[in-house]
């Protein structure tokens, strides 16, 4: 199977994740779309690793998974904290830091 | 065979991704992401990286998605309103996303990488199995391994600090729209077997019963309940 297909699929998934971040306003769904983008990056890393015949790209992909897990944990903690304060879960209404 | 499997997995991954973006209910978005992750694990297997595929299924589809499902169940899937802060945002965003895809494809495919048109080099049978990855992680990338473990520890501590019990919530934290939103969601005069006591607003309850644990309820953090016409303990 040609490696190009994996790369094209990866950029397509990245674009879909970016569209989701642009059009959705629930912070949970925005986190999910971030996961999509990180996974697209993972797919590109693993595909390039196979293309070069070197396993180090897979180690990169594993580290990206760790970072994604940390991001999810902190993001979901923020969402729960926002929910506890009974603020609206909508990224357009949580605009106190915007100035 | 490999092509068929690739296209099936690609359709699954793409459909899952589109489902994440398009579903109105966040719970369905999470389920679509699980489909996406399993399809990606199949793609990783096709790229002969077995350990990454296993970690994808175990870590992502197992642990992280369970976390998502719990948070969605706790927070509740609210439907987004159709209000657009930027006019034409939902129309413009797919166009910009398509432009991003075209740019990425041009950038990668036009980069004249040597192996882009090929299937990749011959690999040994042990390519990407746990032994090889573990050897790399614990010898050559030991520093990154330890740094990621510290990062995980920091994230766990940060999540506990963020989402733990907040004792210092002022009485005016949730005043205004959101409390009215939750007041609207309250089922009118249902039986007292309500499974979500913390979603109530203080003005809808009678005087707080001392037998209930007060720290479980957000409503008890609002000071004395306002005098309201609804004082009807069912």
Image (tube, coloured by chain):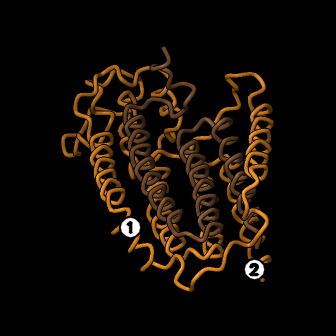
Chain colours: A brown, B orange
Query: Quarter holding the C terminus of chain B?
Result: top left
Q: Total marks drawn?
A: 2
Q: Residue at x 61, y 35 (%)?
A: A25
- Residue A92 position within the rendered picture, expressed as x and y whole percent measured from the top left: 57, 26
Looking at the picture, tell me which residue is in the foreground, A6 or A84: A6
* Relative image position of residue A6 (x, y in whole percent): 71, 63
> Which disc number belongs to residue B137?
1
Rendered image: mark on residue B35: none
Tell me: residue B197, above or below residue B207: below
Relative placement, left or right, of B193 versus B100 is left
The image position of residue B14, as x and y in percent, is: 73, 59
Q: Nearer the viewer, mark 2 or mark 1?
A: 1
- Give the residue drawn at x 43%, y 54%: A69
Lower sequence index among marks 2 and 1: 2
In the picture, measured across the screen, residue A27 lies left or right of residue B91, that is: left
In the rendered view, tell whether residue B164 sits above or below residue B114. Answer: above
| Disc 2 and disc 1 in contact, CB within 8 angstroms | no
């Amino acid at each position: 199977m040609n490696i190009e297909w994996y790369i094209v699929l990866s950029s397509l998934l990245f674009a879909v994740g970016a569209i989701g971040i642009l059009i959705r306003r629930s912070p949970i769904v925005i986190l999910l779309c971030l996961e999509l983008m990180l996974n697209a990056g993972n797919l590109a890393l693993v595909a390039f690793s196979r293309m070069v015949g070197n396993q180090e790209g897979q180690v990169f992909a594993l580290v990206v998974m760790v970072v994604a897990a940390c991001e999810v944990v902190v993001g979901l903690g923020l969402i729960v904290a926002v929910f506890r304060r009974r603020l609206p879960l909508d990224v357009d209404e949580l605009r106190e830091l915007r100035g | 065979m490999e092509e068929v499997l690739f296209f099936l997995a690609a359709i699954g991954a793409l459909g899952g991704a589109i489902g994440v973006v398009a579903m109105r209910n966040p719970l369905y978005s999470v389920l679509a992401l699980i489909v996406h992750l399993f399809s990606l694990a199949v793609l990783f297997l096709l790229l002969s990286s077995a350990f990454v595929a296993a970690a994808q299924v175990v870590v992502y589809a197992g642990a992280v998605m369970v976390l998502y499902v719990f948070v969605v169940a706790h927070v509740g899937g609210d439907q987004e309103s159709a209000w657009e802060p930027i006019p034409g945002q939902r129309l413009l965003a797919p166009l910009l996303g398509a432009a991003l895809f075209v740019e990425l494809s041009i950038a990668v495919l036009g980069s004249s990488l040597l192996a882009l048109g090929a299937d990749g080099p011959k690999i040994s049978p042990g390519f990407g199995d746990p032994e090889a990855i573990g050897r790399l992680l614990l010898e050559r990338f030991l520093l990154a391994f330890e740094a990621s473990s510290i990062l995980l520890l920091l994230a766990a501590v940060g999540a506990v600090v963020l989402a733990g019990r907040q004792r210092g919530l002022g009485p005016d934290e949730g005043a205004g729209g959101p409390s009215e939103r939750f007041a609207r969601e309250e089922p009118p005069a249902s039986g007292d077997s309500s499974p979500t006591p913390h979603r109530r607003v203080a003005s809808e309850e009678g005087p707080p019963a001392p037998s209930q644990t007060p720290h479980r309820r957000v409503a008890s953090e609002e000071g004395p309940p306002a005098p309201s016409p609804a004082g009807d303990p069912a």
